[in-house]
């Protein structure tokens, strides 16, 4: 079973609309930051994966459900967990919570691609770290 990664973010004024509610597209930014931090806690960065293995991890698709709004100055926790792997891709479940209440769920399909954008095998070193 894959391990869970956790990341917190504070909602700033720039993240909100005039009513102090987080603009819907900013949830995607929070999810991206959480994925990058998950990779970082495994000892990698997006640029080091490219440099060492010659691949990039890109989003193929994202399905997000907004359950409740996040608001100015709230602290949000994003949990990320790998649900499944194929040779070249993985499915990640990400949840955004406020005070242990889920406010958004997302399922993100990520693909490992080479410098030409062609699917490429997920580096074993990375896969092992994401799983354990």
Image: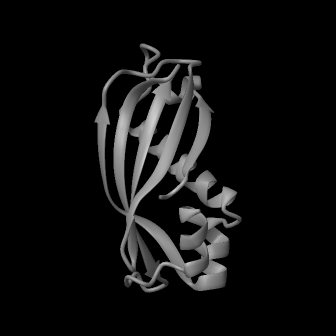
Does 110 sit left or right of 100 as displayed? left
Task: Identify the image quadrant of the C terminus.
Answer: bottom right
Residue 39 vs residue 13, the one in the foreground: 39
Residue 55 vs residue 97, the one in the foreground: 97
Does 119 sit left or right of 1 as displayed? left
Q: Residue furthest right?
A: 43
Residue 119 vs residue 130, the one in the foreground: 130
Q: How many marks?
A: 0
Residue 18 vs residue 78, the one in the foreground: 78
Residue name at image x 48 percent, y 69 percent = 57
Q: How is the image coloured?
A: one colour
**Percent position of residue 128, x then y:** 57, 71
78 relative to 90, above or below: above
**Percent position of residue 19, x then y:** 42, 13
130 relative to 73, above or below: below
Residue name at image x 35 percent, y 44 percent = 106
**Percent position of residue 44, x then y:** 67, 67
Residue name at image x 44 percent, y 79 percent = 113
103 relative to 86, above or below: above
**Percent position of residue 112, x then y:** 44, 75
Does 131 sit left or right of 110 as displayed? right
Q: Residue furthest front?
A: 1
Does 54 sit left or right of 110 as displayed? right
Residue name at image x 60 percent, y 40 percent = 7
**Res. 11 image quadrant:** top right
121 relative to 94, above or below: below
């Amino acid at each position: 079973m894959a391990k869970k990664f956790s990341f917190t973010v504070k909602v700033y004024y720039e993240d909100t609309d005039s009513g102090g509610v987080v603009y819907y597209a900013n949830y995607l930014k929070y999810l991206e930051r959480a994925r990058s931090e998950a990779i970082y806690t495994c000892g990698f960065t997006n640029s080091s994966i490219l440099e060492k293995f010659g691949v990039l991890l890109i989003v193929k698709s994202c399905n997000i459900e907004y359950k409740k709004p996040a608001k100015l100055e709230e602290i949000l926790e994003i949990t990320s967990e790998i649900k499944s792997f194929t040779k070249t891709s993985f499915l990640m479940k990400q949840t955004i919570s406020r005070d242990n209440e889920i406010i958004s769920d997302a399922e993100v399909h990520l693909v490992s691609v080479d410098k030409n954008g062609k699917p490429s095998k997920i580096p074993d070193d990375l896969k092992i770290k994401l799983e354990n």
